[in-house]
Image (cartoon, grey):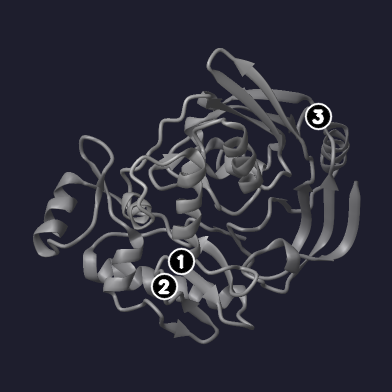
């Protein structure tokens, strides 16, 4: 277990904001997570449960305790034509995707190259290219911070919705996640009808991709439009795509007939936030050292030397302009602390 005071969080946030926390605790086993839970029960300090920091914006130094999982390991158990892939919460999520594709366990190919760790996947309900991780989460194992007991929570009990879960709200700071189990299929059924997946495959003359080919195409799409955080500080998609009702959709599509959209229910439509932001003229622009990525307006970047407050000021300006132009609100996907 790691226990450090006045600990730098520079390596723990992909925006590259040079901030620190008062105390940093890291657990490598269930027993260590339980020991931390016991310690925290006697603490009144603010608490931040941290993954890889790839979906996080720190406004400044965190004057409290940061807890991080370093539990590793991937175990596989067959069930009929499916497998249960149980992963330590500190595993890199894309390493798990790569493992699954390599071994013929299917259902997460479209989630390739999403940054972050396994534990955060269960908190955030990560998703991309028409797929969400909630659809394959079988269960989440976690230490209850109040009781110190290990609980196994079924995926259906986690309250998943678009980029959301109970872990972000009523269960916030109530659990230390130790493992996540994904139920995957031995049969490959690709999801190709979202965004430009088919076009990317066609460029390589692929009509019916293998799981490996689909993963490589998703990676190529992401690398083409998303900046590498090791080069340019960012947290990937900064905003959630707004969901609008039929009345709002009809108003918008009448005025903007070229507007892209995805129907996600009988009366709900998803509008790409990147398109809304680009229409407001923000793509490639900046405020001080905080900018909008030139290849993807959904991504805010640290141009070097930006503070968390600089990123927030840019975000607020974009939200204002989208509301003014389109009459709809967009909200950060990134957790702001």
Q: Nearer the viewer, residue 86 or 332?
A: 86
Percent position (x, y) of residue 161?
44, 38
- Residue under the image location 63 percent in, 45 percent down: 93
SS for callout 3:
loop
Q: Nearer the viewer, residue 222 or 174?
A: 222
Q: Name the image quarter holding the C terminus.
A: bottom right
- Residue under the image location 46 percent in, 52 percent down: 218
- Residue under the image location 59 percent in, 14 percent down: 79
Identify the residue position indicated by label 3 in the image: 148
Identify the residue position indicated by label 2 in the image: 295
- Look at discs 2 and 1 and give the one toward the viewer: 1
**Which badge, 3 or 1, comes first in the chain's sequence?**
3
- Determine the image quadrant of residue 310: bottom right
- Residue under the image location 57 percent in, 38 percent down: 101
Disc 3/disc 2 C-alpha distance (Å): 46 Å
Q: Residue furthest top?
A: 80
Q: Would residue 158 be visible to someone looking at this image?
A: yes
Q: Mark 2 near mark 1, Cβ–Cβ under 8 Å?
A: yes
Few, some or many C-alpha atoms within 10 Å of disc 2 (few <14, some 14-19, many ≥20)? few
**Which badge, 2 or 1, comes first in the chain's sequence?**
1
Q: Say if 290 sits above or below 206 in the image.
A: below
Q: Would residue 164 be visible to someone looking at this image?
A: no
Identify the residue position indicated by label 1 in the image: 224
- Determine the image quadrant of residue 278: bottom left
């Amino acid at each position: 277990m790691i226990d450090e005071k006045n600990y730098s969080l520079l390596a723990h946030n992909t925006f590259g904001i040079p901030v620190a926390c008062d105390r940093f605790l890291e657990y490598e086993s269930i027993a260590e997570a339980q020991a931390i839970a016991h310690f925290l029960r006697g603490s009144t300090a603010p608490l931040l449960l941290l993954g890889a920091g790839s979906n996080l914006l720190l406004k400044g130094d965190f004057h409290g305790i940061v807890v991080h999982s370093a539990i590793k390991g991937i175990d596989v158990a067959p069930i009929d034509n499916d497998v249960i892939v149980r992963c330590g919460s500190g595993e890199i999520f894309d390493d798990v995707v790569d493992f699954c594709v390599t071994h013929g366990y299917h259902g997460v190919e479209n989630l390739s190259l999403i940054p972050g760790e396994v534990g955060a996947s269960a908190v955030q309900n990560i998703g991309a290219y028409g797929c969400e991780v909630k659809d394959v989460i079988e269960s989440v194992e976690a230490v209850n911070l109040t009781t110190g007991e290990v609980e196994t929570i079924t995926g259906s009990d986690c309250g998943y919705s678009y980029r959301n879960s109970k872990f972000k709200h009523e269960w916030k700071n109530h659990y230390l996640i130790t493992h996540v189990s994904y139920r995957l299929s031995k049969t490959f059924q690709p999801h190709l009808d979202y965004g430009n997946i088919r076009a990317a495959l066609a460029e390589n003359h692929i009509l019916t991709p293998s799981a490996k080919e689909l993963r490589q195409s998703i990676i190529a799409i992401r690398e083409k439009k998303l900046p590498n955080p090791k080069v340019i500080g960012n947290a990937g998609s900064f905003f959630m795509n707004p969901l609008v009702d039929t009345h709002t959709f009809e108003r918008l599509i009448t005025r903007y007939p070229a507007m892209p959209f995805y129907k996600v229910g009988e009366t709900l439509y998803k509008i790409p936030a990147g398109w809304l932001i680009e229409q407001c003229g923000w793509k490639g622009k900046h405020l001080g050292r905080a900018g909008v990525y030139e290849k993807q307006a959904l991504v805010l970047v640290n141009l070097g030397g930006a503070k968390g407050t600089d990123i927030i000021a840019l975000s607020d300006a974009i939200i204002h302009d989208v509301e003014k132009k389109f009459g709809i609100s967009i909200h950060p996907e990134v957790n702001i602390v």
